[in-house]
Structures are given as C-alpha cells and as structure tokens.
C-alpha cells in the first residue's frame, strides 16, 4: 500500500468513527500516525546479506592469543576466507571449522599451497599419477574431473580447467573450500553432517567433521583449533 492509499484509508476510517462524511485528518492526526509508524517500523533483515566479523579487532586479538603474531599474508588469508564464508552465510561453527581446516592444511600460513609444497615440481610430475591435476588450494583439489566440476559450479568460465594453478588464487581457493566443504566434494561428507546450522559446535562434532576432508587424520588436533576459532568468532561478533 502506498502512503497516499494509507492516509486515504485513515480518513475514511475517521469519517466512519465520527459519522461526518466531510471529516478529514488534522495535522495533529497525521503527526500522530507518522510517529506511531516510525516507532514500530523495523527494516526487514536481508536474508541474503553476507555475514562478517563485526569486531575485527576482538577477533584477531583472540586469534593471536593462540597463534602468536600474524604476518600480513596470514591476515590476507583470513580476509579471503572470511569473505567467501561470509558470502555463503555460514553459521559460526561451520566458519570455525573452515578456518581451522585451512589453517591446518596450509601449515598455518593461510595461503593456498600445492600438494607436497616442500618438494619440487619435477618431483610432483614424476610421482603424482594425476599430474598436473594435483592438489592445490586451502583444501587440496585433485583430479581433472574435480577441477572441471569446480570450474563449472563456481562459474569460472574455463579458467580453472585451462590453468589448474588458478586454484592457488586466495579468493578462488576460498570459494573452493566453501563449496567443497558445504557440498561434500572431497569425501562426500559435508559440514551439515556434523555441525549445527545454529549455535556452537562441540569438540566431538569438530573431531567428526574431519571426515569431510581426510577421514580422521589429526582430527583431535584440528578440533582443538576449531574450538579456539569458534571462541574468536564469538568474541568478534560473527553475524
């Protein structure tokens, strides 16, 4: 209903109450209606709005309490991950486990890495039978068919299929982590299988969530990290 229609209805209602067909709204009536409307109006929550850390200083302060000082490259990594996770509107427990996974899989660098990054490209070519479609990213994307799937589902226009190193771009790697963990790309297991869509996740739930990536390899260690990230996100007002 437009404002004009609303006030026309209000005039008609006043005439009905007073029995005077010529009655109209006084300025005092209009002011009272406007004041009452303003007091009750609340903007509708945008369900599609990205989530974000509301208090970055508090978040990074809590993170540094268990990581120590952070390099700018690590902060940039957090930014890429939180941007992609926020766009997906992940709840706090999912976000915490996504960060913990990236932190662990990249050896705490928060930068996308190549599979066996401590070894040479010639080693990978000689020893990895799915070369050049070896693991890359915050979470290791492997095999040509999975690169092609990610390219298609993330609408990358063939860039990832033509150049697998495109998965090393932080924003692309973050989107792959988000889609992969949410949809079960890596092991068929996904976040919703283990973690709540609202509220906090517990240690056992985080431990079980390791199956999303790699069965139960180092599951307890990563779960402990996830709990700490969850506390940091709560301190930073993740919403």
Image: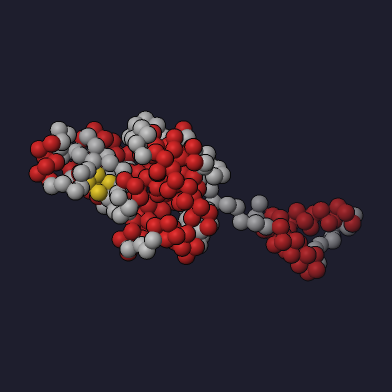
Task: Say which of 14 and 90 sits in front.
Answer: 90
Residue 189: x %, y % from top left: 40, 32
Residue at 26 percent across and 35 percent down: it is 146
Task: Say which of 53 and 233 sits in front.
Answer: 233
Residue at 43 percent across and 43 percent down: it is 223
Residue 158 seen from this side: no
- 197 lies above or below 22: above
> Most extreme residue toward the right, as rendered?
19
- 195 lies above or below 38: above
Residue at 12 percent across and 46 percent down: it is 121
Q: Is residue 198 toward the left or the right of residue 32 in the image?
A: left
Question: In which quadrant of the rendered view does residue 115 lie?
Answer: top left
- 113 lies above or below 35: above
Residue at 49 percent across and 50 percent down: it is 230
Residue 203: x %, y % from top left: 49, 41
Question: In which quadrant of the rendered view does residue 24 lie?
Answer: bottom right
Residue 212: x %, y % from top left: 38, 35
Q: Is residue 220 toward the left or the right of residue 23 in the image?
A: left
């Amino acid at each position: 209903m437009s404002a004009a229609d609303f006030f026309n209805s209000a005039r008609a209602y006043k005439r009905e109450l007073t029995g005077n067909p010529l009655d109209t709204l006084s300025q005092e009536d209009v002011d009272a209606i406007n004041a009452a409307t303003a007091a009750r109006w609340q903007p509708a929550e945008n369900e599609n709005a990205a989530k974000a850390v509301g208090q970055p200083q508090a978040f990074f302060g809590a993170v540094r309490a268990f990581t120590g000082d952070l390099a700018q490259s690590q902060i940039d990594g957090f930014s890429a991950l939180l941007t992609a996770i926020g766009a997906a509107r992940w709840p706090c427990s999912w976000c915490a486990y996504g960060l913990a996974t990236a932190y662990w899989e990249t050896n705490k660098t928060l930068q996308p890495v190549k599979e066996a990054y401590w070894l040479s490209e010639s080693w990978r070519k000689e020893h990895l039978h799915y070369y050049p479609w070896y693991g890359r990213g915050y979470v290791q994307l492997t095999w040509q068919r999975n690169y092609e799937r990610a390219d298609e589902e993330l609408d990358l226009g063939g860039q990832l299929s033509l150049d697998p190193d495109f998965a090393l771009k932080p924003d692309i790697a973050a989107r792959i982590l988000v889609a992969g963990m949410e949809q079960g790309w890596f092991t068929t297991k996904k976040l919703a299988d283990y973690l709540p869509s609202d509220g906090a996740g517990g240690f056992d739930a985080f431990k079980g969530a390791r199956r999303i990536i790699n069965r139960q390899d180092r599951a307890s260690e990563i779960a402990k990290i996830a709990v700490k990230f969850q506390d940091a996100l709560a301190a930073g007002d993740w919403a």
